[in-house]
Amino acid sequence: MSGLVGRWVEHFTLRSAVSAAQADDAAARAERRVLLAQARQKLAAGDALRPLAQRGAALMLVVETLALLVDCADADSPRAALTALGVQDADEVATRLIDYAGRAPVLDADFSGVDEGAYARLRDATTDALRGASVRASSAKALRSVALTRSLSALAFGLIAFLVLALFMLPRPRILVEPSAFHGPAYVAANVRDGDPETAWLLPDGLTGHLDLRLSPARDVHSVTLLNAHNAPFNDRGTKGWALELWRGAQKVAVREGEWAFTPTPLPTVLDLAADDVDRIRFVVKSHHHLGAGLAEITFR
């Protein structure tokens, strides 16, 4: 697997690291832990000798510690091992390590300024190498634990992404308002669903007609509330005779008829008209007051 997907899988599963750790058998990990323990003991002994003015012996213990850690890295060369263990300037440190490891034990009386600088550099390198060797000595179980954590994180992220996508893909409830006709751009059918009693859907002068609310998806209707138009400030239009119908597909499942007297301050009319799985509510204008008919608001629950 390559490309972006491959990098993503590697990041969340640590596939390469886990494979390497699993290939490193238990015996090798156990040997590495023993070497690491011996290295810590030698370094502690060297640190204890140095304040006692046994500087030469302390230097050789640091060199031996670093040599053990190089073995722990299991690399082809001291330089490669030190690089793998996170030591800075691995070339310089490897040169010093080989130089001092090949010498006879340094006598404290012959300890020089060069040795002093080498001790400090090798001591710092040993600290870095110990840290790196500790990481290398960790078990495959720890790596698998990290891989599991990342895999669970990826799973959680994927699940959240799926739920968000599913939410957006679910059909959203919609109400489409369709009139048989309307008087002009200021009197469109959408006015009956804007919550403003001063706006209205008006039919052209002298015409009857109807207004449909198409419900998607279909839903149960328990009651419908109507508010007649009056066309303020002229107060020259309004519906007189009307019918309210509930439809399920091609079947009319409920109907109520009525008649309104004209008033410039109409009040809502609540109809206890109910049916299941209604996909269309139709308001039918049968007659009108003055110049024409209309409707200010229609709501349902």
Image (spheres, rainbow, N blue to C red):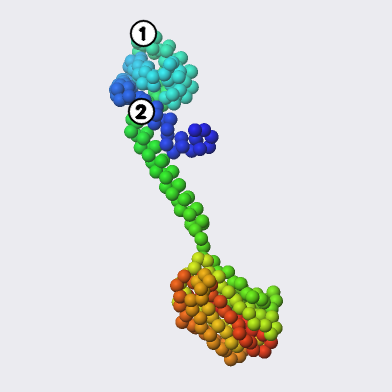
First in residue order: circle 2 vs circle 1: 2
The amino acid type, in three-letter code, at marker 2 is: Gln
Q: Which residue is mark 2?
A: 22
The location of residue 65, given as percent across then percent down, is: 35, 19
Q: Residue furthest front?
A: 250
Determine crowd level at label 2: few under 14, some 14-19, many 20+ residues with C-alpha closer than 10 A. Answer: some
Image side of residue 146 versus residue 197, left or right: left
CB atoms of marks 2 and 1 within 8 Å: no
Q: Which residue is mark 1?
A: 104
Query: Which disc is residue 214 wearing?
Result: none
Residue 211 appears in the picture as rendered: yes
Q: As displayed, is residue 132 above or below residue 286?
A: above
Determine crowd level at label 1: few under 14, some 14-19, many 20+ residues with C-alpha closer than 10 A. Answer: few
Residue 112 appears in the picture as rendered: no
- Whole-angstrom CA distance, mark 2 to mark 1, is 41 Å
| Pick the front one: 255 or 16 | 255
Q: Residue furthest top?
A: 104
Give the mark toward the camera: 2 or 1.
2
Q: As displayed, is residue 161 above or below residue 256?
A: above
Q: Secondary structure at mark 2?
A: helix
Q: Secondary structure at mark 1?
A: loop
Q: As displayed, is residue 148 above or below residue 284?
A: above
The location of residue 14, given as percent across then percent down, is: 42, 34
Q: As displayed, is residue 1 above or below residue 79?
A: below
Q: Residue at x 37, y 18 (%)?
A: 71
The location of residue 174, given as percent across then percent down, is: 54, 66
